[in-house]
Amino acid sequence: MTATVDFALPAELEAQGPPESRGLPRDGVRMLVSRAASGTVTDHSFTDLPRLLLPGDLLVVNTSRTMPAAVPAGPGLTVHFGTALPDGTWLIEPRIPQGKSTIPNDLVSPPRIIPLPGGAELELLGRATARLWHAKLSVAVLPYLLRYGKPIRYSYAARPWPLEAYQTIFGRQYGSAEMPSAARPFSPEVVTELVTRGVTIAPITLHCGVSSLEADEDPYPEQYDVPPATARLVDLTRRSGGRVIAAGTTVVRALETAARGPQAGWTSLVVTEETGLRAVDGLLTGLHEPRSSHLRMLAAFHDAGLLAECYEAAVSHGYLWHEFGDVHLMLPLAGPPRAWPR
């Protein structure tokens, strides 16, 4: 298994709220830029992105919208709705409220039938993993969440933030338990400058499940869709010598799955150094927690030495972590164009 980067994350580097709450515009976050070709790590603002990508590059973004996926189930239980399954059931996580957040419920089995606000009932059908359960709600889930749910909140958040704070400008279809946060800094101004500089932007959809994974725990299957037009643009970009840049690890997972099989469905693919990359050249991503599975994906883009240098620089220069924090642009090795696998 690919080793992940292990480091100490100081509490003061955990972003407690969106940049707007810190007096910054949405696109006012910092951006660490690392280049595999030269092994360099430099400091930028996110608004530098259009000048760092090249004419002919393809930027692929995720159009999934964040759901209000946390539902209180009484004083001792909160339910996080994660992923809708093809048979109409959901992967959910029962959690225990603690202070302003929740903790995993790994000691006490929840009741088989959980009463929820508004008279709804959630039936637990069996464990899916050590933390997650298969469950069925007695009413339609999405309308119910939009009425009774709240955004999933973790302990580093200073206070509850409205659902709109957890959306990117690309979001079109509700389905993510947690925000595809790498694209949160994009503003209409940045998008306009990217397009006028010759960067093409194309969509995929991957609905993110709950990401509160234990250390070294793999992400579970997620629903994705790579439109045929986006697949053609990936092929054309590679054939013409451009680079495919993924805006987020969710985009990497979707494109790399489509490069290996169907262009829509459910993906269990965990991208690592060993799997390699067939469709994606570079990555815009957030800063990930020590030993998280996302860091294993990052090892497919950079060698261990450069990746460790990136995280040392981010910590020492006060970059902010989590969904409201700063971002990291990983630019690729130079090399010949490669066509979309057929």
Image (tube, rainbow, N blue to C red):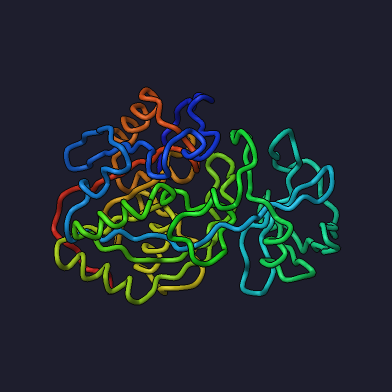
- Whether residue 330 sits left or right of residue 224 in the image: it is left
Using the rendered image of the protein, determine whether residue 291 is visible from the camera's viewpoint.
no
Using the rendered image of the protein, determine whether residue 17 is visible from the camera's viewpoint.
yes
Percent position of residue 130, x then y: 68, 49
- Residue at the (17%, 38%) spot, across then down: 38
Quarter residue 263 falls in? bottom left
- Residue at the (53%, 60%) spot, across then down: 65
Percent position of residue 283, x then y: 32, 50
Q: Quadrant of the C terminus?
A: bottom left
Q: Is residue 139 above or below residue 285?
A: below
- Whether residue 305 sits left or right of residue 227 in the image: it is left
Percent position of residue 314, x then y: 37, 30
Frontmost residue, 247 versus 134: 247
Quarter residue 194 falls in? bottom left
Figure label count: 0
- Whether residue 40 sits left or right of residue 142 in the image: it is left
